[in-house]
Image: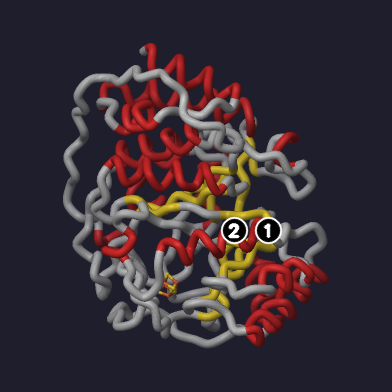
Amino acid sequence: MDLLNTLVDKGLRREPLSRAEALAVLGTSDDDLLDVVAAAGKVRRHWFGRRVKLNYLVNLKSGLCPEDCSYCSQRLGSTTGILKYTWLKPDEASKAAAAGLAGGAKRVCLVASGRGPTDRDVDRVAGTIKAIKEQNEGVEVCACLGLLSDGQAERLREAGADAYNHNLNTSESTYGEITTTHTYADRVDTVQKAHAAGLSACSGLIAGMGESDEDLVDVVFSLRELDPDSVPVNFLIPVEGTPLAKEWNLTPQRCLRILAMVRFVCPDVEVRIAGGREVHLRTMQPLALHLANSIFLGDYLTTEGQAGKADLEMIADAGFEVEGAGEVTLPEHRASGGGCGSEGACGSEDVCGTATAAPVGEPRTDLVAVRRRGAGTDLAPNA
Ligand code: SF4
């Protein structure tokens, strides 16, 4: 297919795709799906080899959020029976992080519910970062604390944070349908603050919230403009007790196309499969490793992932290897500070035929389990 040859060439040269090309990837038929995966896989291997980076989530503070993000079980008014607890102490967080690191993770993602941290919260997280870094040499720490005020990104950087995560989640034009208590512009501002403070920016999306292909392309192109080092791709887990509980819109094939599109648009960026991997990709998870170079090990913030051991077996069985603590994730040009940039769109308009998408099957509510172990409980974490 001419389109795929063009996209591979562009991916290897870090040339930007046009919107039409990105939309065409989402519009490919199921008959062409393996060709799409193979093509995007060439780009993935060119920049990241067969390495899979493992990240480990520690939910520092769970539930009771005043914001109303429709996809989130920690939102105001959520009736999902999630674990609710206030800030973990530094040694509790460090213990949870150590379990993930022992399981093979090299980055720990410290997440707290809420609109954004107070300065006191930032101090508290600074203490936690210090404890984790003291006890685990070489660990990368990413903080995810919501919207940042002036000076807070710098404070986190000084405390030893390597990265800051704040997702755009969806397109600017549909953002107001998903959340009303803060704006898309607020989110962009926080990613820019993280960047400006010298933190590695991590920002991604959530697919499956009822958005169009155009919305998905919009948000991925906006991310390309922001130039984060890592782009987590979440597949909505429609959790009972949230407004999006009935949004079962994804198939494994659709998830693979979305990941391929993200890989082509952001060829040299860490593309991370985030929440919803087990629920929506299901037995197709190993194919997704040909597109993404990073996943979360173990459980998510409020729901349970597959056993950490199963993650490791899947990586080995698919012919990939866990990225070691001493290996640099990003390609040299990016690790040294030069990103893929946003040089404008190219002119190719090679669009393929009509999509024959697999029908969305029965909602797999049986695969959604609220987290009942790890941080905030007396039970061992999944790692
Ligand atoms: S995504 Fe974050 S800000 Fe939004 S409701 Fe959930 S915890 Fe609160």
Q: Residue at x 48, y 27 (%)?
A: 40
Q: Quadrant of the N terminus?
A: top left
Q: Do the residues under discs 2 and 1 have CB atoms within 8 angstroms?
A: yes
The residue type indicated by label 1 comes to Ala
| The residue carrying mark 1 has its beta carbon less than 8 Å from ligand 1 | no
- Residue 181: percent from the left, percent from the top? 36, 75
Q: Nearer the viewer, residue 261 or 131?
A: 261
Give the quarter of the image for residue 336. top right
Which residue does the numbered mark 2 point to in the structure image?
A: 192
User: Where residue 355 appears, x then y in whole percent?
Assistant: 21, 28
Crowd around label 2: few <14 · some 14–19 · many ≥20 (10 Å): some
Numbered badge on residue 287: none
Q: Is residue 312 visible?
A: no
* 3D distance between C-alphas at marks 2 and 1: 6 Å
Q: Quadrant of ligand 1?
A: bottom left
Image mark count: 2
Q: For this view, does 144 lie left or right of residue 133?
A: left
Q: Residues within 10 Å of mark 1 (few under 14, many from 20)?
A: few
| Residue for point 72% across, 77% down | 126
Residue topped by disc 1: 196
